């Protein structure tokens, strides 16, 4: 979608649809009040009929208002004036875009930046508008005939500002948000694809295509024979049950100084997880195609960095495999040797994500990283603990935790920190190996992170459990593209692009 900044006399602005805000009790926002005056009070007159009270998310389409050049005016409820936050603003934006998609408007002008949410500046408000709009117009269609798709979808949004002095900040926000949205869109599309299409090989080919598209990105794909030479016994033990070969995707983005240490993002890429011999229940097993959302989000963050040409060095690492039951698959009680040399007793073959991640995390030592952040749809326990709103954050590095939490707040892509105390490590003790791959029901998200921490002693590290946020179930089933926004925000801040 195309986004542009507009200024000038709003009443004279020609557009298929002008979007204005209305607070509860028919209180007009500044732009709406000005348009009401230009139309001779027609907007206030129509509101008195009671079709729109101003509750957050309500919409009302008006036509041929006198004194206005706009063909239509869409009124959007913004709730109570004193309670206008970023979250409420995004809800109203979603409603506006949905309403526009039901018309033949391919273009609209939004005059919703006055007033700004109480917890956002213009940069954040514009960025939220772009990302929210892109999210609501996204439709998965690669493997279906989408008969309900809009015949004339929304393709251009103009954001009206009352003065030119804020134009530079708003245009920068659009640029950043558009790159974020591209990354989110890539992550969603990859994640929504079925497992018979989006295989480890497909993910690797997608990364290689990114490498061809951007000069600053070099992509290397390690095959199973190379992983075997490196001693990645944990990762390879997972792929043994599948006919699809595992891949280790390594994407080097070089935008910073040659001697600057890279930030490394590691994403779990299980393109389908049946649980292996510890087979999952049949109900909702189709959603296990989303077990690669961590890897998809890393690809999305890499795309965003490339689009923005950020002055930073970063590396995206995606260990990818399937986890299926087979005669060669892991069995409960099997012991494998990781790349680090530590032996692992596999008590539950459905705790396979940590097995592919641990070897990838050991591989990251060679990059002498500034920090490593892994993200994975790792545990249902994290969903039980936190629900589906924040990702779980676990790290023993307080400064890194503060940085990630702040980035999540700025990007409206929040995390919540869980403890990573040494007390939990005892749950991973094994009588037959250096470590067990599960630690029982209690604190499952924490013991999973404790397992990974055994392989990250050589660098600063944080873990994001995204099991609750990476996808939606039920009627709204589909990938969310989270936490690409958080990761991109982190890259923007670390690169100095926001200064």
Image: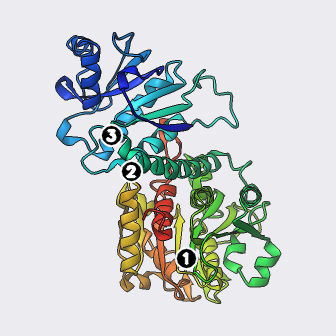
**Neighbour tally class for label 2: few under 14, some 14-19, many 20 plus, Cα within 10 Å:** some
Estimate the x, y position of residue 88 in percent, counting from the top left.
30, 40
How many numbered callouts? 3
The image quarter in which residue 96 lies: top left
Whether the residues at callouts 1 and 3 have beta carbons within 8 Å, the answer is no
- Which residue is pictured at 60% across the width and 81% down the height? 345
Q: Which residue is mark 1?
A: 437
Judged left or right of residue 91, residue 480 is right
**Numbered mark located on residue 89 in the image:** 3
Q: Earlier in the sequence, mark 1 or mark 3?
A: 3
In 3D space, how far apart are the residues under numbered discs 1 and 3 (Cα atoms)? 43 Å
Q: Earlier in the sequence, mark 1 or mark 2?
A: 2
Q: Nearer the viewer, residue 452 or 217?
A: 217
Whether the residues at callouts 3 and 2 have beta carbons within 8 Å, the answer is no
Residue 156 in the image: above or below residue 179:
above
Estimate the x, y position of residue 371 in percent, counting from the top left.
51, 78
Estimate the x, y position of residue 338 in percent, counting from the top left.
66, 83
- Which residue is pictured at 35% across the width and 69% down the height? 417
Judged left or right of residue 485, residue 139 is right
Quadrant of the snapshot with the N terminus = top right
**Neighbour tally class for label 3: few under 14, some 14-19, many 20 plus, Cα within 10 Å:** many
Q: Nearer the viewer, residue 282 or 228?
A: 228
**Numbered mark located on residue 123 in the image:** 2
Q: What's the coloring here?
A: rainbow
Badge nearest the viewer, 3 or 2? 2
């Amino acid at each position: 979608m195309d986004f542009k900044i507009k200024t000038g006399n709003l009443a004279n602005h020609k557009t298929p649809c002008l979007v204005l805000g209305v607070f509860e009790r028919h209180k007009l926002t500044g732009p709406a009040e000005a348009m009401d005056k230009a139309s001779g009070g027609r907007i206030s007159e129509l509101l008195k009929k009671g079709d729109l009270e101003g509750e957050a998310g309500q919409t009302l389409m008006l036509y041929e208002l006198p004194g206005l050049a706009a063909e239509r005016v869409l009124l959007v409820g913004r709730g109570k004036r004193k309670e206008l936050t970023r979250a409420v603003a995004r809800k109203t934006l979603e409603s506006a875009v949905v309403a526009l998609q039901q018309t033949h408007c391919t273009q609209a002008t939004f005059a919703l930046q006055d007033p700004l949410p109480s917890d956002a500046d213009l940069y954040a408000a514009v960025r939220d508008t772009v990302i929210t709009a892109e999210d609501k117009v996204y439709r998965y269609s690669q493997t279906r005939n989408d008969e309900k798709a809009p015949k004339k979808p929304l393709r251009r949004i103009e954001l009206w500002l009352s003065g030119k002095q804020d134009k530079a900040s708003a245009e920068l926000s659009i640029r950043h948000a558009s790159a974020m949205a591209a990354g989110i869109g890539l992550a969603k599309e990859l994640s929504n694809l079925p497992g018979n299409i989006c295989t480890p090989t497909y993910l690797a080919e997608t990364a290689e295509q990114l490498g061809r598209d951007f000069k600053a990105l070099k992509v290397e794909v390690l095959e199973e024979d190379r992983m075997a030479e490196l001693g990645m016994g944990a990762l390879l033990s997972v792929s043994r049950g599948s006919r699809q070969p595992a891949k280790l995707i390594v994407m080097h983005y070089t935008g910073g100084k040659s001697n600057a240490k890279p930030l490394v993002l590691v994403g779990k890429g299980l393109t389908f997880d049946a649980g292996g011999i510890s087979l999952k229940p049949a109900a909702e097993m189709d959603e296990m195609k989303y077990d690669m959302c961590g890897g998809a989000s890393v690809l999305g963050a890499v795309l965003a960095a490339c689009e923005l040409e950020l002055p930073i060095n970063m590396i995206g690492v995606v260990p990818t495999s399937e986890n299926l039951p087979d005669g060669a698959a892991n069995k409960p009680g099997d012991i494998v040797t990781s790349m680090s040399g530590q032996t692992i007793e596999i008590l539950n073959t459905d705790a396979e994500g940590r097995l592919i991640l641990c070897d990838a995390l050991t591989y990251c030592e060679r990059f002498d990283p500034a920090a490593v952040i892994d993200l994975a749809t790792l545990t249902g326990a994290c969903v039980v603990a936190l629900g589906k709103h924040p990702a779980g954050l676990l790290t023993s590095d307080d400064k890194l935790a503060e940085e990630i939490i702040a980035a999540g707040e700025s990007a409206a892509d929040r995390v919540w920190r869980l403890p990573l105390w040494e007390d939990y490590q005892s749950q991973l003790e094994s009588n037959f190996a250096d470590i067990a791959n599960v630690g029982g029901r209690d604190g499952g998200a924490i013991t999973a992170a404790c397992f990974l921490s055994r392989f990250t002693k050589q660098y600063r590290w944080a873990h994001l459990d995204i099991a609750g946020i990476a996808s939606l179930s039920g009627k709204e089933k589909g990938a969310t593209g989270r936490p690409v926004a958080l990761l991109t925000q982190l890259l923007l801040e670390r690169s100095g692009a926001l200064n």
